[in-house]
Amino acid sequence: MTSEISHQSYLVRGRAGGSAKAAAAAAAVLLSGLALSASAHAAEVAISCGATGAELQFCKDGADAWAKKTGNTVKVVSTPNETTERLAIYQQTLAAGSDAIDVYQIDVIWPGILGNHFIDLKKYMTDAEVAEHFKPIIANNTVGGRLVAMPWFTDAGVLYYRKDLLEKYGLKTPGTWEDLIADATKIQDGERKAGNDKFWGYVFQGKAYEGLTCDALEWVDSFGGGALVDDKGNITINNPKAIAAFTMAASLVGKITPDGVLNYAEEDARGVFQSGNAAFMRNWPYAWALGNGPDSPVKDKIGVVALPKGGDAGKATGALGGWELAVSKYSKHQDAAADLVKYLTSKEEQKRRAIGGSYNPTIAALYQDKDVLAAVPFFGSLYDTFTNAVARPSKVTGIRYNQVSTAFWNVSHSVLGGQMKPADAVVQLESELKKIKRSGWLTPMGRAGQAASCPPAAAGTEQVPLPASALVIASEAKQSRLLYSGLLDCFASLAIDEASR
């Protein structure tokens, strides 16, 4: 049996007017709500789940099936859709050492940030079960030799298009961004002349948040401009191909893309496309099942292909996304929680989610399953896109990834909004990343195997060793607007790791 606690009462506002105080209050409400609702059951497991599209319902259904099978109970906690807000709550809940949540749904970019708070799942999974999943994701989820999370579903950005409109206007699917702009312009002009003045050529995620990091990374990578920071830790964003990518992206807004895209997240873009008011959309695979739902105005009119290349010399690409399941080391029900993770990440459960919700499996064999391919045909045709997606530089930048991503999406947002020229943007971004990097990227294990320590609070100061009161410092400081600071993330993760020894 499952029950649900909604995130609505503790949602951290990411828009203007939001504050870190709201985040602190949010976490407090979350913890108290869960504590008050705890029952006398020996194994009542609380799992946090996202709520984008049908995500929450699929999580509840899977958890309920496990509960019926085992006789345990599950409490499903819905969390904010936007990753930035969700991470803020996770950081505060875990920094408090709370046992309120047993199983965390975490972004593919978070194992290196939050891994110290999670147990090693290796002893709960057989080698054969682990080997079923894509090796790069298992490697991503392994921190310091510990398997801190199991893959639940993977993702890569894809291009949705209206099959009926391409046929109507005699067009093929676009191969390059130049093709997309031309095709979107033609369809937009035609549909507006036909009476739909709300019609747009292309929609995507343009809000200043992690989703824009994904979109912008796709633009840059498609032009051959790299992945912001390479696998050796070198900052690579200041190059002509990255400038060309930003120039292309800036040309979209106000022409084939509404000005309002600057506030669009995934569901906002899907709302425009699924209502029949856009020819093309960049989104994740989850939108396929919803777009073909019985009440969708564009049911059976949607096609999916790889995102366009950055010119003939560019490449089709997609940002690597996806979500994992981890068990808190503060949980009082670690065995039961790990068993829930084992069930939810199993082949059978991933097949159910793929067919019903178009969630990409992390198990390679399911991409050859006839039932899965009948439900989501592009899982087969875009297999290479999913397995070769461009990764955000979260592993190499470690605890400082949040600062890296924030700098990237803020500069990208300024380019889209016309406040910054592309050539100036890459110079400024390079400068900001150098300041964030300082003398080296900081991973949970320290720099290049050195003893872990936190970065200096400001340029020109000495390296700060881990103080005994770091946990208190981090807890109090997280109430401020420095919520996402790499320094505070470092103190919080290292202090809890030290306290647990």
Image: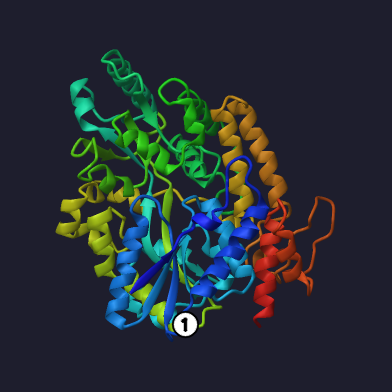
For mark 1, does the 10 Å Cα neighbourhood hold few (<14), some (14 to 19), or many (20 or more) residues? some
Tell which residue pokes out farthest to the right in this image.
461
- The residue that mark 1 highlights is 333
The quarter holding residue 237 reads top right
Q: Residue at x 71, y 52 (%)?
A: 482
Helix, strand or loop for disc 1 = loop
Q: Residue at x 25, y 51 (%)?
A: 379
Q: Is residue 26 above or below residue 117?
A: above
Amino acid type, mark 1: His
Front-lying residue, 483 or 236: 483
Q: Position of residue 458 (x, y in %)?
A: 80, 52
Q: Residue at x 35, y 26 (%)?
A: 180
How many marks the image carries: the answer is: 1
Q: Position of residue 173 (x, y in %)?
A: 26, 30
Figure quadrant of the C terminus: bottom right
Can residue 316 be seen at all in this image of the molecule? no
Q: Position of residue 442 (x, y in %)?
A: 66, 60
Front-lying residue, 400 or 475: 475
Q: Is residue 298 above or below residue 89?
A: above
Image check: 119 left or right of 460? left
* Colouring used for the render: rainbow
Figure quadrant of the N terminus: bottom left
Tell which residue pokes out farthest to the front in this image.
36
Q: Is residue 250 above or below residue 371?
A: above
The quarter holding residue 324 reads bottom left
Front-lying residue, 258 or 46: 46
Front-lying residue, 224 or 16: 16
Can residue 303 be seen at all in this image of the molecule? yes
